[in-house]
Image: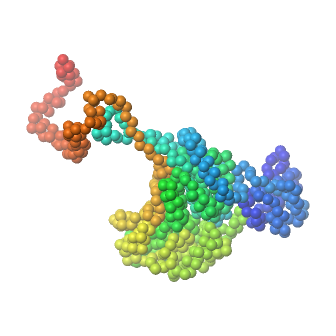
Amino acid sequence: FHKEKRQLDHDLHLPDVNMKTYCPTMLLVSTMATRLTRSGALRQCSCRMILPTFTSSAFPRWTFSHTSIQGNTWTCQRGRRRLRFFSVHSYDGTTTSRKETPLDSIAPLVNQAHQTFATQMTQPYDYRIQQLKGIENLVQENWDELSSAIANDLGQGPMYAEAFELSSVVSRARYSQSNLRKWMETKRVPTPFPLNLNMPIHSELAPNPRGVALIIVPWNLPIQLTLNPLIDALAAGNVCILKPSEKCDNTTSLLTDLLTGGKYLDPRAVQVVNGGAEQATELLKHRVDVISYTGGGEVGRIVAQAAAKHLTPVLLELGGKNPTIVTKNAHIPSAALRIAWGKITGNAGQLCVSPDYILVEESVKQQFTNELFKALDKLYPLSTYSMPSLEESGQTMYGDVGKMISVEYAQRVTDLIDSTCQIIYGGKTHKVDDRFVAPTVVEANADSNIMKSEIFGPVLAVVTVPNVQGAIDFVNTHYSSKGEHPLAMYIFSKSKEEQNQIMTSIPSGMCAINDVLKQSANYHLPFGGIGASGMNTYYGKFGFDFYSHYRGTLVENNFSTQKFDPTVWLTFPPYDGMKLFAYRCISKFPLILDNIKKVLPFVKVAIPFCAAMYLANHPAMVDMILDLNIKKILKWISLAWR
């Protein structure tokens, strides 16, 4: 509201041309404008809409009684209320309608990225810091817009957007900024014998950017899994090409404008390719220097095959069937509460680290399921999603449960529930047409359909096992023996022995004990899978290391060419028996030193012990030591010097 001009400017960011969702907002603006006009506080109300084109059918006819279009201005009138809307294609880096990148423009885009990297503009420390600060500012200055995009795409509230998406990006950007100088340092490393005979000589290790990084982003964490790999790649000095998911249209559209608008990041260093499988396939045909992909295993194999053609290193985060093991020594109420929270609040189970199925010991199974039902009733009461509410954004919200990414995904999960096993909780209030699947718990066994693939929805499968060894055998027999290692494993037990037994017996990318999900939020830990759940790791320093090539360098400053120099005599031909004998003798020195190191701890103990025994048998020596003073010591030194 401009006080001097008595003019109200309102911006509506509308990624979808269908305006029915936004009618309540526009009527609210109209009512507010009428009241302000009557009071004399307002002369004009202008609303700028982000739409590619204006059509008279953009609004339902009942919204306004009269409309007129002249150029890019649309005047709408209902009674005495009159609003003017302006169609614009960009406005201060805010959302525009997302357009797919033409296939024929991808090859020039990749070539331009290689040319940009060749200029070495992305390698200086100050430039990298500037880009990291840009990502931090991008999130902080567009917090509400990003949160609204998450609500539109995934049906999640502001608490989820802040905890699972936005705050983690800000903290990781700051962490990289504070540690980047140390990470970029060239470090000295030891030079082993006999290489170090040719002194002066030293060895060093320096991180160098790989080049052009292709980052293929999934839809389930569209902000975090776009910006966190981007932070690591830019910190390492790479040029980045992003391929966001086409499924989360609102978030992708907003991020595309923010990343390529030039306000926060250098568009030469960050380029975005929008579209579906065709654009991704075209990108993979071209050589890049490193690829990061997060998503399903089937597409992950395609990415790995494409990378192999160019011998390109690849980071794959593929998820999998993540087991949650509850033993008889677990704190049952705590385990039930945390598992329910991690499965449902964690994007309605649409996270690659979500608990997928529960292996619970038979002796505590009934107690655990009762506590699990109580936790679900407490955290996600039926009333919050059987009677959904309408948020200001126009989205239907189902409490803190969230939605599936699409109607097809919702249908897949409900079909899986109906065709698989016995439902023991929930499963009756789904609204597939609105992408909503209610929290559900089922009983399953190894032959159930729900155990044959990753669920990726708000459904927990409970499998009963006789004991801890039974849980280990279940995972290893049905999954690990086939190379299908889980990305994450969760253990609920107060017994250290049981914890070690399970971790030793079941391979997994990550593990959390007596909690879920939180290990993936710690950027001091590597994030990555093993086997079918992925390869390589990133996050924080681990991400910087992945997007860097550590080049080892040996620097020798001995320029001698004389034969009397032993290293010159030994290194260069002609070779004879004497040189061979000398080389064999010198090569044994490291073995001798290793043997000395093995007995050194005993020597450190033996010398003080022997000295104590000697002094005990010679009391006069103790008196002499006690009588020593600085004058006698200086006198002895002067005599020795003479």
Q: Position of residue 231 (x, y in %)?
A: 55, 50
Q: How is the image coloured?
A: rainbow
Q: Position of residue 551 (x, y in %)?
A: 44, 44
Q: Position of residue 188 (x, y in %)?
A: 39, 39
Task: Name the image quarter holding the C terminus.
Answer: top left
Q: Viewed as shown, does residue 154 lie left or right of 538?
A: right
Q: Viewed as shown, does residue 630 lie left or right of 384?
A: left
Image point (55%, 75%), residue name: 440
Image point (60%, 79%), residue name: 428
Is 380 situated above or below 280?
below
Asked if residue 345 can be seen in this view, the reply is no
Is 200 situated above or below 60?
above
Is 117 situated above or below 218?
above
Q: Viewed as shown, does residue 411 lie left or right of 61?
A: left
Image point (84%, 64%), residue name: 56
- Residue farthest along the left direction in this orientation: 617
Q: Quadrant of residue 215?
A: bottom right
- Residue farthest along the front direction in this orientation: 574
Q: Quadrant of residue 605?
A: top left
Q: Camera-side residue: 436 or 615?
A: 436
